[in-house]
Amino acid sequence: MRTLDIPLLFGPYGSASAEVADRVAENGGNAIWFHGFDDRLFETCARHGLSACVEFPTFRADLTRAPHLTPIGVDGKPIRFGQLVQGICLSQKEEVARIESDLRAGVSSYLPAGIWLDYLSYAGWFETPQPDLQESCFCRACVADFCEATGVDATDPRRILSDHRPQWTEHKCRRIAGFAELYRSIIREKLPRSVIGAYMCPWGPRELDEALTRIFAQSYPMLAPSIDVFTPLIYARKSGRGPDWGAGFLRDARQFVPADRKVLLILDALDAPDCLTATAASEIPSWGLQLYGGAEVFSDPAKAKVFRKAVDAIRSATAGGSGA
């Protein structure tokens, strides 16, 4: 699919959106994003003439139930995770194979308008004002993979970070980009016209000591060949940011998102309506709009009206060719 063929998509994210699907269409929405390949949501979208968009979880797991998937930190122990860290050890081949199998099964059975890859990154969490940024993944298998791929002779995590950090970061980014390419090929084989999106850490490349690549291994240039649309998670209140955060990201994104790729923000319903108003006023428009927990907004006529105005403003701005 060429970039110019990517449609403008607007709507809520979440399974509860099924209950307000009629209001989505009435208020400018044309899509619903939901977790996994959900029969009920596909049927709901078809009934209301909405595009069905799947959020497909990649490296996400309940580490309390599957502790063997926990990445290893610099100290040789499993990283801290609690309820606010997602990510798995990428050397866990059975889990990686299961993820691939689930994607193949989904694209063989359903026809989504788009598939957004989620948690396509190394371990971490960013929906908080003070993120706990931990270096990983230093199990023997991951370190061996690094040494083989780069020719570096170093097995101690501290030495890797002190003497070979650039190579380590690049290796991690290439590893994530490699999985993106695999998933792209799986999707394209069955669904050549489906939009491929990726949910992204919402930080710029230089923020927090380059944590976007250093911790999460999300490199826009490396991911771009596999991803049509990048979707940063602009959850302002959770992250301790203001309602204009999304507009600022869109402005700054021109410096680091490849020009032939689109940026489609996902906002948090907790931040409505201010976030919607600020995003709609952005000089650089989002290429469509997602609203996490959006059923709440569409259940409130006043907030739904703000969403409709935001949609109208974004459509008007993108018609002028100024979309991010």
Image: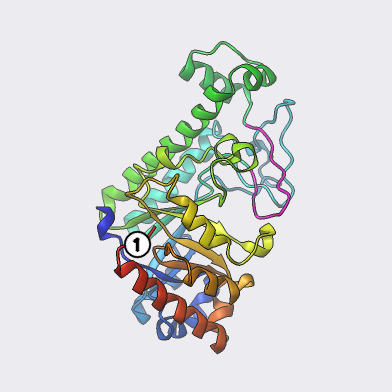
Q: Amino acid at mark 1?
A: Ser
At x 41%, y 35%, the residue is 178
Residues rendered magenta in the picture: 124-136
In this view, 106 is above or below 40: above
| 113 magenta-colored | no
Q: Is residue 124 above or below residue 157?
A: below
Within the image, what quadrant is residue 160 found in? top right
Query: Between 133 and 40, which is closer to the camera in this rendering?
Result: 133
User: Where is residue 153, by image quadrant?
Assistant: top right
For disc 1, the neighbor class at 10 Å (few under 14, some 14 to 19, many from 20) is some
Q: Quadrant of residue 6?
A: bottom left
Does 259 sit left or right of 15 as displayed? Answer: left
Q: Is residue 185 above or below residue 29?
A: above
Q: Residue furthest top?
A: 153
Query: Mainly helix, strand or loop, the magenta region?
Result: loop
Q: Nearer the viewer, residue 38 or 258?
A: 258
Query: Residue 136: where, in percent of width, then height?
Result: 64, 32
Please give the name of the residue rendered at 49% of the width and 51% of the height, measured from the top-left corner.
252
SS label for mark 1: loop
Residue drawn at the location 45% of the way across and 67% of the way down: 289
| Rendered location of residue 1, percent (x, y) | 25, 53
In this picture, is 190 found above or below 224? Answer: below
Residue 88 appears in the figure: no
Judging by the rendered image, the residue that carries numbered circle 1 is: 322
Q: Residue furthest bottom?
A: 301
Q: Residue at x 59, y 79 (%)?
A: 296
Q: Residue 88 placed where, x, y %?
A: 60, 40
Q: Nearest the camera: 122 or 132? A: 132
